[in-house]
């Protein structure tokens, strides 16, 4: 039997961010937003009040969810901070770690004979870490970690560094899972240990993750 979330306020981030280089080009990533949207949909169906901050994705807004569309990491940071307080923050977005230092107002032109273009990037603000350190810290802060190797080790290090309550690690490149896929497999890690969820459809995994969230909030 799944635990209820009635009356809980959940804030979810989903999708990629796009960091503009010029009016025609950006740096993005392969996140589809499906995992975060599935979490928002299931949470709303279980009675939670859900705010979903979404990067650029091609997904319909789940029933009963308040959606805020953003493009860049800076916009996502502002939208998330403004949406606090909440009972739980679930950071499922693939936020850019770096953004162009000085986006060009005009389209960048290749110069005759130019073989190399050097882009200068600066670090973005870590939304998840800032939510966890905020004076309005939610009772539960949940992060995601996409890793290509040493999945559990790197995820646990992130859990501690960003002061999270839970981190959901998934291995990038596992067949049929992760980016753009309808299925996923997660290793849910907290201070006490780890639990493997899936491989399963993202909607089913969202339900299992929200069982854990509801238990923690109860
Ligand atoms: O450190 P890494 O980017 O791998 O951590 C992933 C987690 O941190 C995800 O939950 C992501 O939403 C969050 N994150 C963030 N802001 C950033 C970078 C990552 O909230 N600038």
Image: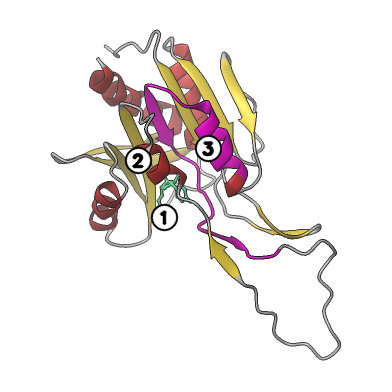
Considering every residue shown, the one lying at the far left of the view is 192
Q: Residue at x 43, y 9 (%)?
A: 47
Q: Nearer the viewer, mark 1 or mark 3?
A: 3
Q: Position of residue 20 (x, y in %)?
A: 70, 57
Residue 172: numbered disc: 1
Element under disc 1:
loop
Label located before the other in sequence (1 or 3): 3
Disc 1/disc 2 C-alpha distance (Å): 28 Å
Label located before the other in sequence (3 or 2): 3
Q: Residue at x 25, y 54 (%)?
A: 157
89, above or below 159, in the image: above
128 relative position to 124: left or right: left
Q: Are marks 1 and 3 in contact (CB under 8 Å)?
A: no
* Quarter of image, res 116: bottom right
Q: Position of residue 155 (x, y in %)?
A: 29, 51
202 relative position to 71: left or right: left
Q: What residue would you read off at disc 2? A: 133
Can residue 33 be seen? Answer: yes
Q: Nearer the viewer, residue 133 or 22?
A: 133
Q: Nearer the viewer, mark 3 or mark 2?
A: 2
154, above or below 42, in the image: below
Q: What stretch of residues is rendered in magenta? A: 75-102
Q: Residue at x 35, y 31 (%)?
A: 137
């Amino acid at each position: 039997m799944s635990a209820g979330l009635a009356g809980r306020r959940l804030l979810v981030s989903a999708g990629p961010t796009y960091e503009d280089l010029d009016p025609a080009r950006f740096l993005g990533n392969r996140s589809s937003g499906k995992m975060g949207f599935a979490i928002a949909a299931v949470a709303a169906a279980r009675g939670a009040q859900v705010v979903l901050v979404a990067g650029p994705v091609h997904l319909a807004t789940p029933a009963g969810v308040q959606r805020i569309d953003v493009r860049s990491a800076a916009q996502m940071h502002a939208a998330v901070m403004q949406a606090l307080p909440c009972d739980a923050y679930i950071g499922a977005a693939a936020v850019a770690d770096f953004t162009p230092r000085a986006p060009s107002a005009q389209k960048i032109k290749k110069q005759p004979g130019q073989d190399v273009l050097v882009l200068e990037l600066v670090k973005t603000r870590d939304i998840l870490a800032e939510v966890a350190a905020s004076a309005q810290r939610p009772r539960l802060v949940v992060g995601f970690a996409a890793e290509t190797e040493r999945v559990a080790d790197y995820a646990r290090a992130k859990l501690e560094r960003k002061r999270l309550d839970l981190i959901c690690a998934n291995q990038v490149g596992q067949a049929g899972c992760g980016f753009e896929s309808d299925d996923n497999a997660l290793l849910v890690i907290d201070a006490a240990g780890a639990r493997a969820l899936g491989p399963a459809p993202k909607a089913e995994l969202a339900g299992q993750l929200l069982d854990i969230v509801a238990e923690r909030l109860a």
